[in-house]
Image: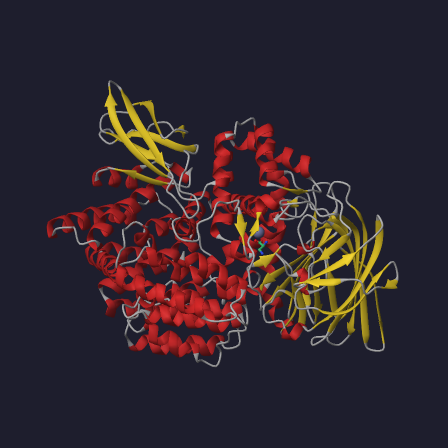
Amino acid sequence: PPVIRREDYKPYPWIVSETHLDFDLGLDATRVVSKLTVARNAKADPADTMRLNGDGLELLSVKVDGEVVNNWRMDGDDLILPLSSDAHEVEIATEIDPSANTQLMGLYASGGMLCTQCEAEGFRRITFFPDRPDVLSVYTVKMRGSAEQFPVMLCNGNEVATGEEEGERWAEWHDPWPKPSYLFALVAGDLVSNRGTFTTMNGREVELNIWVREEDLPRTDHALESLRKSMKWDEETFGREYDLDLFNIVAVSDFNMGAMENKGLNVFNTKYVLADQETATDADYDAIEGVIAHEYFHNWSGNRITCRDWFQLSLKEGFTVLRDQLFSQDMQGEAVKRIEDVRILRAAQFPEDSGPLAHPIRPDSYREISNFYTATIYNKGAEVIRMMRTMAGPEKFREGTDLYFDRHDGEAATCEDFVSAIEDGAGLDLKQFRLWYSQAGTPRVTVAQEVVGDGLKLTLSQEVPATPGQSEKKPVPIPLRLAVHSRANGATGPEQLAVLTEAEQTFEYPLAGPDPVVSINRGFSAPVRIKRDVSQDDLAFLAASDDDPFARYEALQELAVGHLVAVASGDRSDADRAAGEDALAKALGAILTDDALDDAMRGELMTLPSESYLFEQMDRPDPARIHEAREGLKATLGTTLASEFHALYDRCEAVPFDGEGARGARKVKTQVLTYAAASDPAKAAELAAHQYDKADNMTDRQGALMVLCGLECPERTARLLDFYNRYKGNALVIDKWFTLQALSLHPQAIEHVKALAKHDDFTLRNPNRVRSLYMAFAGNPQAFHAADGEGYRMLADLILELDPINPQTAARFVPSLGKWRKIEEGRAEKMRGELERIAKAGNLSRDIYEQVARSLE
Ligand code: DPP
Ligand code: ZN
């Protein structure tokens, strides 16, 4: 497959001012007639042909200015149409089979309804079209089909007219806003809606609908409320008002991604719509709120201003992730949300940035764009913009975004346009900062401190590691929020902002008292790794009393990482090990009993660094030893702090579902159970079974079942069976049932996964189900990294089997095997062997080909 390069960008030679689509809908056969009004683009190199992208279409006819023509030719999947004058009407008829569309790109059938997914290049699977984001067009769409099968027909924009005769229904929709083809959407099926309204800041009333199957209607209130909150917040925080009279969201159970921001008609994975107390956890509620916000915010950052080409993907995704993170911080609590976002970044993006698939947030090349919907584009992209906001301050940053929205409204823009607008509007100099867009890799910052008179001299140095295709790196501007505290008198120093721009630089700050302790990268102000020599006592002090909640979390993590890495690498003496455990028990004990902390924050602080994060900190580690070290620490802490844990559990257990601080209490309860499972499995089984049995909500029930799944006990089998029977037929909850077993700490987890793959409810056709089993499995270090390589073989088998069905989803599993360069030699060879086995198989999709080739380089 060819490599596509950013530097090769050329404007499209034709302007497509209007697109009229006519759909004859059928689950097995849909006919599409597309009429395009085209004219030469004066800003592009002239061309005497028009390239229309296609993929898997049956071409029925081509007309130019009303006459059938036969002078077109195919170039691969694309249709090349000669056009002689400056303006034409092009009409193309095609037929597609939505039921056979297992890739879930383009128009496809899902549970008897029809729906679309067009980003990034799915529209070409509906009709021949210049399927690129810089071709903006005004769409008018007519749909026709069986009134019984498709009583509801939806499209972008507003409904213009509708009718029904002789069992056939039709509807015509018009979207006044020019848009690229990736934002096109159509839905037809038997759906009902939870309807609401929102009055915009200028007093316009907008109709809101959450469309679902009838039986799901009772679980849509949270989604509707989240949408209202998002609309209000975007007005208040970014001055953005909604621009149509109608906003529809449709929930679909077969969906490759989380959700899609199609203009006026968002299509969502049911996972990010449906929730009630009985079937959704607190985390599910938060995720729904966040994803609804994300897709809604795209209406401005993505739709009104879209991307010139797919290399600019982070222009809309990075910015929109930042916007949804800030929204969720406001809704859910700033400190806890920040900790969660950093945890995601470290779990998903840091490994990407240090592995074979590393790429800058604005890539230079790709073969398959679907492979670039990554944590780097999304989450690091958001961090990069967050740094601009930190340097400018929120008010000046807002002036920057106002200018961006003003300057580029209606355009297909670039990352460079965004940076320039922030530069001009917020008054920042971002010349050097642009390196964050072009360089991959997570910078490492080394910190050294020295008392000089009554000040502290801080020497900061940075290094950006080499990444594939980028051996030489330049220093980047790194904004570090920091404070100098005194351990001797407990005084906290004022917050400072140090922007490290050179390879090495010194900064001086006044002392707050003797024994200075530096609190650095507060709030995780820069997406970097910090390296420093810091004593256990200093870390314990920060964990107990830093005034920045993120820094407290970070100090405790650092303390645990230092200990666990040493234990797992086998260079801790027994005495050092005991001292390390002691320090951690003291620090954690202080957290458990700190009355000033709320439980939501306490729950975060109680979370030990994950095995995959520890893996990242080590040189060619053995995952089994990491697992052993971490479980060992949990057992020790569980034993040492048993009475604190139990007191905490009892207090939290007394909080009723809707009581004050109930969400935090639920989080803490399950955390306590995970420590108990390591230290006193019999007691943990009893407690967890009890929590399961009396649960009046999914958070408690899932937490209890998660703990039981890791234990070998009769309670495990009974509750797993109960859970299955209780929720049979509820796909999203049955997904949880698969996930809990695949993620479990049970020594036979790998056997359980094999058995579950043969379960009647397992299918490769539904991405949620595939991920519920295999993403969980790939994220279960103990099972996936089985020393004999069985886990790697299973994942490679899955990739090969899924590729012909759904390449986009299959490709998501490749990075797990790409860790071979990092892991100890024995496993490395086995992982690499599986990648080679995939590479040798014939007929690979572009998606898999690219990911495997890059992983082997
Ligand atoms: N553009 C979508 C989103 O991130 C992904 N397909 O919202
Ligand atoms: Zn997005």
Q: Is residue 73 left or right of residue 568?
A: right
Task: Identify which residue, 571 or 692, lies in the foreground.
Answer: 571
Colouring scheme applied when the structure was drawn: secondary structure
Residue 820: x %, y % from top left = 34, 59
Residue 612: x %, y % from top left = 34, 56
Q: Is residue 628 left or right of residue 164?
A: left
Task: Identify which residue, 296 or 362, lies in the foreground.
Answer: 362
Q: Is residue 326 left or right of residue 518?
A: right
Q: Does any portion of residue 693 appear in the rendered image?
A: no
Residue 105 vertical placement versus 318 (above, below): below
Q: Quadrant of the C terminus?
A: bottom left
Q: Quadrant of residue 411?
A: top right
Residue 533 vertical placement versus 19 (above, below): above
Instruction: Give the tally of numbered discs.
Output: 0
Residue 61: x %, y % from top left = 80, 68
Residue positioned 58% across, 37% down in the render? 416
Q: Quadrant of the N terminus?
A: bottom right
Residue positioned 56% across, 33% down in the render? 397
Q: Does any portion of residue 644 appear in the rendered image?
A: yes
Task: Identify which residue, 125 or 157, lies in the foreground.
Answer: 125
Q: Quadrant of residue 665?
A: bottom left
Q: Is residue 316 left or right of residue 11?
A: left
Task: Identify which residue, 562 or 483, lies in the foreground.
Answer: 562
Which residue occupies the extreme top position in the image?
Answer: 453
Residue 687: x %, y % from top left = 30, 67
